[in-house]
Image: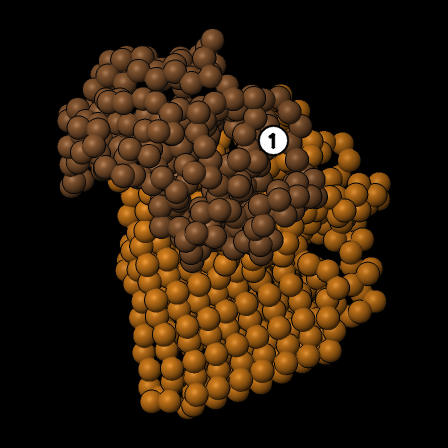
Chain colours: A brown, B orange
Amino acid sequence: MPMLKISNLHVNVDDKAILNGIDLSIDAGEVHAIMGPNGSGKSTLSYVLAGRDGYTVTDGTIQFQGKDLLALEPEERACEGMFLAFQYPVEIPGVPSGTFLKTAVNAIRKYRGEKQYDAMEFLTLVKEKQAELGISPAMMRRALNVGFSGGEKKRNEVLQMALLEPRLAILDETDSGLDIDALKTVAEGVNKMRSPHRAMIVITHYQRLLEYIAPDRVHVLSQGKIAHSGGMELVETLESDGYAGLGIESVQAE
Amino acid sequence: MTSQTESARAIEEATDGTYKYGFVTDIEAGSAPPGLNEDTVRFISAKKNEPEWLLEWRLRAFRLWEKSQDTEPGWAKVKYPDIDFQAACYYSAPKSREDAPQSLDEVDPELLKTYEKLGIPLREQEMLAGVAIDAVFDSVSVATTFKDKLGELGIIFCPISEAVQEHPELVKKYLGSVVPYSDNYYATLNSAVFTDGSFVYVPKGVRCPMELSTYFRINAANTGQFERTLIIADAGSYVSYLEGCTAPMRDENQLHAAVVELVVFDDAEIKYSTVQNWYPGDADGVGGIYNFVTKRGACRGKDSKISWTQVETGSAVTWKYPSCILQGDGSVGEFYSIAITNNMQQADTGTKMIHIGKNTKSRIVAKGIAAGRSDSTYRGLVRVQPGAEGARNHTQCDSLLIGPECGAHTVPYIESRNPSARLEHEATTSKISEDQLFYCRQRGIGEEDAVALIVNGFCREVLQELPMEFAVEAQKLVAISLEGSVG
């Protein structure tokens, strides 16, 4: 049984059809990349998976580890092992990153019937993960994402992913706006997370990140549908000939 | 309550002793008939065996109150039905054991659920809910334990009714010296009929080694209605005083009109922290407490300091402006406030900073959180008198709205009569965004916990001012106060 099975997914936003019949199946251990021009529905797909309000599923089903994903609240999906690394991580003034993360980790552990970490245990764990990812410990004391640079925000997303140990991680344009060093940090973080028990969806515009990550499958979205699926060769075609090379019209996002 | 665990142990030890102190034992059972007239005032004074000068003071207050029936303040942004002062009872004998619940089984389960969430031990739950328990689980006997320790340092901490008997010279000198009986309608009423409250005196150069808390002193059921507190910090001394309780407090008296006076001399400091969680009424606002409080401190000495910190979550109507008169040169006034309103609650709260001495400084940080159909108003005055060379004030007012039906208002008054003054005012209004909520939920944090997390972040600057363990409880309280405000 695949970890995630999306069948004939149709989604409206403000009564406008954005996804028009997505079929996608991902097994544990696989990394899938999703590319596509602006407005093709990439971010919509990630939000629908995570359960954001305002996205109406008009047809189709999503099975996640055998459960009807669409019947779950966003926090239940998170607790079941779904993680979304945000394209634009939000700021929460006054809440230290460490407090936020500990609350999240313990909420998920509680859901899974695991013992909650106390402050010391959590600190030890965070230090370990930070060292692995080369992230400054000072970040934990700063208010979540407030005054963080673009790179710091994305590294923080990767740190959260490492601590929450999801079954399915979705990275929504995590590479956008990153310099080459930050990009490497993010890619290394992602590669460290690869495991036979974990699946990933990497949404991106660029070849560069995929060169570091080397996905198992690549899908190209166009007008709310998967227009092409293949391997890394698809990325190379895109890089040399653009979307036009695949016969896809590039639509500017409004 | 977690913060008082250690003290709770002291309480248990103390409860073996016999009940020696406090006014309850001094008086025969008996209540004043409902209504307010000179006889009521004389009755209260007699019950407390007060000296003639105090009765006279009460009577002067009463006569003024009677004459000023049309001066009940109407300027606050709060609405409530007319209060029938003649229908209320101003002195009631303590409830008999038979009338009280006999065990927690007889107590409102909703109340118990809240105690549970706050992590209050069973014994303390019984006390808070007014269960008739065998041991005299009573703050007065606890105060005795503390009193020995404090006594060695010359610190006086006792019910004000006891101070009237034991230290009349101090009470006479300072009572009404910061909030005169003629100050305002509710202060006048309080002066006429106050039932009890705390008295603290810290002698010269003494740093009080523990947080003083009224929690240990709340005795008779009717203390809370017209409470009167007087704290004096002599030159070079320091005291931190905690008032109130995070646990929801019920009271059959709807009107509360307390007065708190602080007096601080050279280089001394009083830190006064309040957590107010009186019953706010049901979801439609029925039955909640009206809380009309006058709190004021006088920084009389040079380089003296008063710091007010308040977390206001309860009451149907809150009307409260803890203020500082910065008289001594170089004196400092601070006001840190969190006011949370939910359902139909109304809060009109803020501060007054009156700069009189040279180089006086004040800082105001007010955080208002409104949810449900509630209304939260910050109302503050910063006044610089002509002689206050080099006065400085920084005011920051932030409002957070939860849901579309609540209101937040900021009403700052600034009066500067000295050109060297530097006054700054910042104000923001924000909402909890869908983006923030979704982000938290995507990380596994449920909606209500997410709101609590975001609101606690919003309040952080103020929560940091609370004594640490009080702050932990206050954070839980913030979460509980906002339950049901989203979704």
Q: Amino acid at mark 1?
A: Glu
Determine the residue positioned at 44% across, 55% down: A148
- The relative height of residue B455 versus residue B236 in the rendered view (above or below) is above
Which residue is at the far top?
Answer: A1
State whether residue A64 is above or below residue B15.
above
Secondary element under disc 1, as helix, strand or loop, is helix
x and y percentages locating residue B441 in the rendered image = 43, 33
Residue under the point 77% across and 35% down: B135
Left or right of residue B354: residue B136: right
Q: Quadrant of residue B265?
A: bottom right
| Residue B256 in view here | no
- Badge count: 1
Residue B25 as seen in the image, left or right of residue A23: right
Report if residue A227 is visible in the image. yes
Q: Name which residue lies at 76% across and 32% down.
A: B134
| Nearer the observer, B8 or B31 | B8
Instruction: Specify the quadrant of the image occupied by residue B261.
Output: bottom right
Between B140 and A95, the one nearer to me in the picture: A95
**Residue B477 vertical position relative to residue B465 in the rendered view, above or below:** above
Name the residue carrying label 1.
Answer: B116
